[in-house]
Structures are given as structure tokens and as C-alpha cells.
Amino acid sequence: DSGVTQTPKHLITATGQRVTLRCSPRSGDLSVYWYQQSLDQGLQFLIQYYNGEERAKGNILERFSAQQFPDLHSELNLSSLELGDSALYFCASSGLITLDRDDTGELFFGEGSRLTVL
Amino acid sequence: DAKTTQPPSMDCAEGRAANLPCNHSTISGNEYVYWYRQIHSQGPQYIIHGLKNNETNEMASLIITEDRKSSTLILPHATLRDTAVYYCIVRVALRYNFNKFYFGSGTKLNVKP
């Protein structure tokens, strides 16, 4: 158990709809990362939040948005869903990472939310 | 955006060492090399990381070449449970505390009886 909780585990919806995926990071972790993994593909970095603020952005579509709340949980909102958005969405968290101390910089992943768009 | 190159798949006999290569020829001086693995569709799991020196932990060893342009993850005695996709990642430190972790396509390791 990584300590990262993602809900829902499975979600089936129709094209054009909107869904929200939720992530609770490990206790005390300030950074949350979102990744998308389409069938038989690698993980695509979407976005990172640190202590409530967006800090790094990857290949995230304009139809997608995310936020991190004061209690540090994060939500990924996917709107105007298309068939191609069907994927596993992973959340990961990490603690404080600095360049001037030897930190593992390890990411702790949740078990993912599987989204199916019909 | 991935900055690493890995073979798409490898086979290894159970009980033998699995040596997984990774090329990261554009790595810069303050970037670390990380290895993760993903078993089936579970969340990826951290294995090991390093900067310059070779590293070893209870799971694996990491050998980084002197020029840091490539590395090898070694699973000393592979078991069937080590069958997974192994990702080699270069950690891009954008600025204090803010890091993108780019995963490539990884190497599918098939451990065979």
C-alpha cells in the first residue's frame, strides 16, 4: 500500500460527459502528480501541484483541468470526453524535494482510476 | 518529451540476472536516473535511483557509466514476479521542489521458467 488513494477505481461514461477523479496523497506529501496511461502505452505526465499551486505542466489537454485543495487532496476534471480519453489515470505524491540534500525524490503511486468512455 | 531510450522488451530465465539497459545521452549534471516498474496495470513502483555512483538496494543494483550517458538496472536473481514493464526516468529539476518525471515506453521484462 503506497498510501495514495484514488477514487473511483472504475468509471464508465459517455462521450461529451464530464468526470472528476480524486486523489488523496500520502500523509504529509505536498506534491501531487497526474499521469495518463492509454492502453498498452507508457505513462504521460499531465500536471503537478505543490502545496496548492500548479508547478509543472505536461501534455494536458485544454479539456482537462486539475486543482489541489488546502487539505492537499487533488482532483482531475475531464470534460467533453472523447473515446480517446479512455485510459488509466494515475495520481502520485512525493514529499519535499530539494536539490541540495540527498532525498530519494520517490514518487508514490495510487492504484489508478480506469476511465472508459463509450 | 521522454529523455531516455530503452529496448521495448527483454526475456530472462528465472533465477538468472536481468540486465536492463537505458540510454540517456542528453542527461545534465544535476539530473538523477530513476527506475520504476509497473506490474500489469498497477501503479508504478519505485526501484532505485542514482546520480553518479553505482547504487544497490534490496531490490536491485544500478550501474551508471562514467559519462552518465547510459545506465543498467540489474535484478540479480529474477523471479516470475519480476515480470513487469521497467521504466528508466531522468528527473528534470525545473527549480526548487518542482520536478517533472517523464516516463518513456519502458522495457517489458518477461521472466520465463
Image (cartoon, coloured by chain):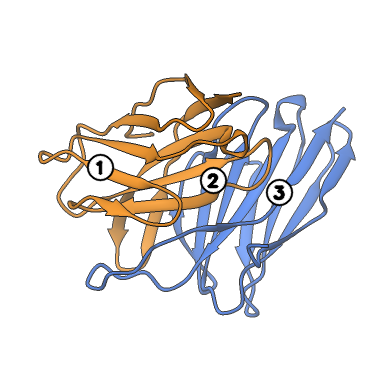
Label 2 chain ID? A
Please state the horizontal and vertical placement of residue B83, each as a whole percent of the image. Answer: 58, 32
Viewer-nearest residue: A6 or B17: B17
Q: Secondary structure at mark 2?
A: strand
Label 1 chain ID? B
Viewer-nearest residue: B25 or A49: B25
Q: Quadrant of residue A98?
A: bottom left
Badge 3 crowding class, 10 Å Cα cut-off, few under 14, some 14 to 19, many 20 or more, is many
Above or below residue A108? Residue A117 is above
Label 3 chain ID? A
Viewer-nearest residue: B95 or B78: B78
Please state the horizontal and vertical placement of residue B76, each as a whole percent of the image. Answer: 40, 40
Structural distance between the alpha carbons of marks 2 and 1: 30 Å
Mark 3: which amino acid? Gly
Circles 2 and 3 in contact, beta carbons < 8 Å? no
Residue at which label 2 appears? A46
Going from N to C along the chain, the mark reached first, 2 or 3, is 2
The colour with which the image depicts chain B is orange
Residue at which label 1 appears? B63
